[in-house]
Amino acid sequence: MNAAPSRLSHRTITQIGRYEAVDLHGIDKDLALTLYSQMLRLRRTEEALHREYHPAEEMRCPIHFCIGQEAVPAALSALVRPDDFMFSHHRSHGYYFAKGAPMRELFAEIYGRETGANGGKAGSQDISHSGSHFYSGAILAGAVSIAVGAAFGFQHAKTRQISISGFGEGATDEGAFWEAMNYSGKKRLPILFVIENNRYATFSDQLKRQAEDNIVERVTPFGVRATQIFGNDVALAWRTLHTEISRLREGDGPVLVEAYTYRWNSHVGPEDDSANAYRSGDEIAFWKTNCPIALFENKLRLQHWLNDDEKDAIEQEIAGEIAANFQFAKDSAFPTDTDWHRMTYEDASPLADALLGTAAGGNFDHYQADAKLGPY
Amino acid sequence: MARQLSYANAILEATDQAMALCDKVVVLGQLVDTQSGIFGTTTGLVTKYGTERVQDFPVAENLMTATAMGAALTGLRPVVCHQRLDFMIYSLDAITNWLALWRFKSNGKSAMPVTIRTIVGKGWGQGPQHSKSLHAWFAHLPGLRVAVPSTAYDIKGLLLESILGETPTIFVEGRGLYSMTDHVPEQPYRVRFGQAVVRRHGRDVTLVAIGSMVPIALRAATLLEKEGIDVEVLDPRTLTPLDRHSICQSVAKTRRLVVADPAWHSFGAAAEIITSVSEEIGDQLRAKPIRVTLPDSHTPMSMALEPRYYPADDDLVVALKQAVS
Ligand SMILES: Cc1ncc(C[n+]2csc(CCOP(=O)(O)OP(=O)(O)O)c2C)c(N)n1
Ligand SMILES: [Mg+2]
């Protein structure tokens, strides 16, 4: 079996062996090279951060690396528009890039510098880039519900913008996720939920936490259209998301795409977490064999859309960008401002200033009785 | 006589005027689109502004708050209404982990102007799950403003200031205050956060009263006037920001302090106010400060116990006499 079965399950997915179903239908050379470069850029960035993390000891925040999970973010990057909003979770870097937020501000943020996307206040797992309408946060499912609110705003304003919420299968343990299904299904909100189902929430198998190892079958009764895909096939991811996003923009929402994929690294940080013995060697080997970048690269080479020289050129460009951004982060100043009040509160209220006047009060009569409460 | 409006109608008028002034204002909450309209505070808005701007919401308080937050990111100014504060507790994640720190975490680049209204029940057997006043919990969180208005005039001005402002704000409204009328000017006006008001001037003792304790405090002060004790009653109106300056100014004059807080005794707003005064001018106090609060216990349902649970005029009279003795 070299294609994915119609009903995906992490229990049986390794039976695919080597996945041979990459299909370029609907994808031209330009788009193919964009998808490929996006995946490679994300992979090389994560590898570089992973490599530098300890020797330098300058990235002092938790980082949840997403090596192995490049296909979905790359596909999204080719489909989202600047005015769409995207929300992600702790494993944020793929989505950050997908929304077009700048690498230099990501690096500087992780290094805790003033020039970071959030001036060093958020770090990798809480990063946001409001100019790109990208927001993340480390509390599972919290950002999923906020994404629902953005979709509410778009529906209210009758725009064609969409809200995209990317997260892992672990977040679907939370009640907040199911509240989001209920409401977005009822309201037919323009929202795309993307689940990267990598089987584990830290070291916990989905089947230790849930009765089934998929989400799609349980959300459709809520009125949420849902599809499963083999999430390491970037061409399939692009085609699926392309169709679903087009329908969303026409008002045909909400939709959930569940992409089966795998993280190669530990849950967090560069330290090895295999002592917890939560996943098998066979499983890891299957997913590395079906590396999203290698699968797509093979196809591009067979198609003669990519050769060694062209690949080298892409690699060099990415390496240059990464090196320059490490340098930028390291050269940037640390934040020094400790005006905690200003960081935390907005004192200005321009709209209230413009619209409201003042008016004198009178004397309050304190002999009035309390409201008499009824049964409710 | 100057124009009088009830507390509930002042809330309705503020919301109505905010919606008329700014088409980004939307109202969310369970049953906000019904005739009863959250005890009359949203009645008729749906007829005037339509179901797009006045939306009923599923019984999902966490999602409701988060929806308001996401909507605020797209430019809307949501007003979220809860029938009881106890129900709102489901939204603590949205409030604590996201709303309160959104501005901070974005490094000041992103704002969520969300106004959350919540009601504290008192009386008619509300019992332990319909009566909790957790204003101190919210006041403990950096990044939020917390309003505890006691009069119709104040709640109108504070609501307008909040709905058209930029900082997420929680209004803790005493259900018992809803029928009380006050002079409420017709035009839209603002009441600033962090500005306490002296409701009654006096020389002998400062009584800081929070929210639904304000009318009780004023009655106690009137009772003591007959005994020659001159009480200054101060209403902070908002807990965050807290007008520590005005409180200290009053205590610097009277040198005695009693705080009346319609919440539990320990770790509450009363403790914060007494501490703030002690830190600033503790050496000028002539008597030990006193807090008059609910006991550290949950609210009993029985009508026999309710009056013994909630502090009333005579409890304040006793405390004030002790402070001046
Ligand atoms: C509300 C909440 N509970 C617990 C955690 C701790 N935690 C951090 S990551 C994680 C697992 C997340 O798994 P999943 O959502 O599948 O994403 P993945 O890490 O696999 O990408 C957990 C439980 C958290 N961040 N938030
Ligand atoms: Mg997972």
Image: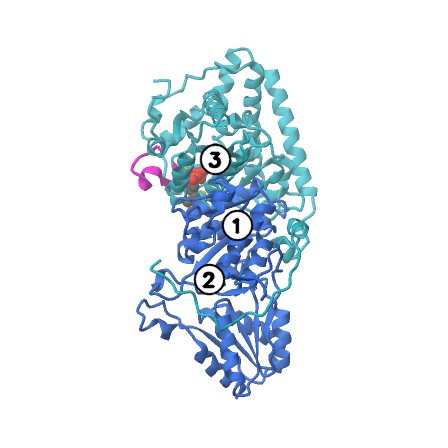
Chain colours: A cyan, B blue
Residue A318 within the segment the image draws in magenta: no
Q: Which residues are magenta?
A: A200-215
Chain letter, disc 1 residue: B
The residue carrying mark 3 has its beta carbon less than 8 Å from ligand 1: no
Looking at the image, residue A195 sits to the left or right of residue A353; the answer is left
The disc at residue B178 is 2
The disc at residue A166 is 3
Horizontal and vertical percent position of residue A16 = 35, 21
Residue closer to the observer: B252 or A325: B252
Distance from Cα at disc 2 to Cα at disc 3: 44 Å
Residue at x 35%, y 63% (from the top left corner): B126
Measured along the vertical axis of the image, is residue A282 above or below residue B42?
A: above
Residue at x 54%, y 22% (from the top left corner): A35
Tell me which label, 1 or 2, sits earlier in the chain.
1
Q: Secondary structure at mark 2?
A: loop
Chain letter, disc 2 residue: B
Image-quarter location of ligand 1: top left
Reading the image, the residue beneath label 1 is: B99
Horizontal and vertical percent position of residue A122 = 57, 47
Distance from Cα at disc 3 to Cα at disc 1: 20 Å
Chain letter, disc 3 residue: A
- Mark 1: give few (<14), some (14-19) or many (20+) Cα within 10 Å: many
Front tag of 1 and 2: 2
Horizontal and vertical percent position of residue A86 = 53, 35
Is residue B1 at least partly visible in the picture?
A: yes
Measured along the vertical axis of the image, is residue A343 above or below residue B223?
A: above
